[in-house]
Amino acid sequence: MEEFIRFKKRFALLIGGMALLISAILFLLGLQQVVFGLIPGAAVAILVFWAHGNVLARAFSMPTTRAKMYVFMNFLVRYVLYFIVLLVSLNYSIWHFWGAVGGLLIPRVVILIFYTIADGKLGGAVQDNPTK
């Protein structure tokens, strides 16, 4: 469990770092409005990822039928949060819609770069257990 908590922290930091890097680049390019959508989108993406990790950790201690319903209901809550962020970004001009979409997609980009393409070699994402 301790390893899972370290993974969640590392992954959340990678998402936040990627969001800040992209925001800095967009800001330097003069696309400040996009940054105003990207930051809230990335913040919600980190929150949703963290909550998802907690849900999965808790579901392992439940009976199977209860765990399935618990995970499914939390799945719906996560997507309602995504919907709310996108709806707010469409209705309020201060949040840039495509920036919010980009912020919500940052965890997938981090997974693609750090955990798929680099196969864990970049940043020590996946490590072999030396005791086995």
Image (cartoon, rainbow, N blue to C red):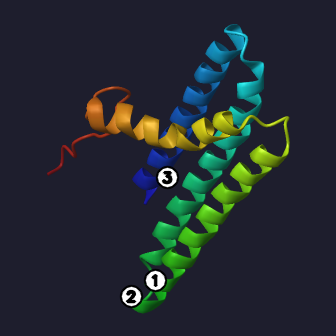
Task: Report which quarter residue 43 is drawn in.
Answer: top right
- 10 Å crowding of disc 2: few (<14), some (14-19), many (20+): few
- 10 Å crowding of disc 3: few (<14), some (14-19), many (20+): some
- Residue 109 spot, x, y in % from top left: 44, 36
Amino acid type assigned to the residue bearing label 1 in the image: Ala
Report whether 7 appears left or right of 75. left
Looking at the rendered structure, the secondary structure element under dot 2 is: helix
- Residue 29 spot, x, y in % from top left: 67, 9
Disc 2 to disc 1: CB gap under 8 Å: yes
In front of the other: 92 or 11: 92
- 10 Å crowding of disc 1: few (<14), some (14-19), many (20+): some
Q: Which residue is painted at 67% across and 42% down in the image?
A: 41
Amino acid type assigned to the residue bearing label 3 in the image: Ile
Looking at the rendered structure, the secondary structure element under dot 3 is: helix
Real-space Cα separation, disc 3 to disc 1, in angstroms: 20 Å
Looking at the rendered structure, the secondary structure element under dot 1 is: helix
Residue 6 seen: yes
Disc 3 to disc 1: CB gap under 8 Å: no
- Residue 97 spot, x, y in % from top left: 70, 39
Q: Which residue is painted at 66% across and 33% down in the image?
A: 99
Amino acid type assigned to the residue bearing label 2 in the image: Thr
- Residue 70 spot, x, y in % from top left: 53, 81
Q: Which residue is painted at 47% across and 68% down in the image?
A: 57
Closer to the chain start, of discs 3 and 1, is 3
**Residue tagged 2:** 64
Q: Nearer the viewer, mark 2 or mark 3?
A: 2
Residue 120 seen: no
**Residue tagged 3:** 5
Task: Report which quarter residue 117 is drawn in.
Answer: top left
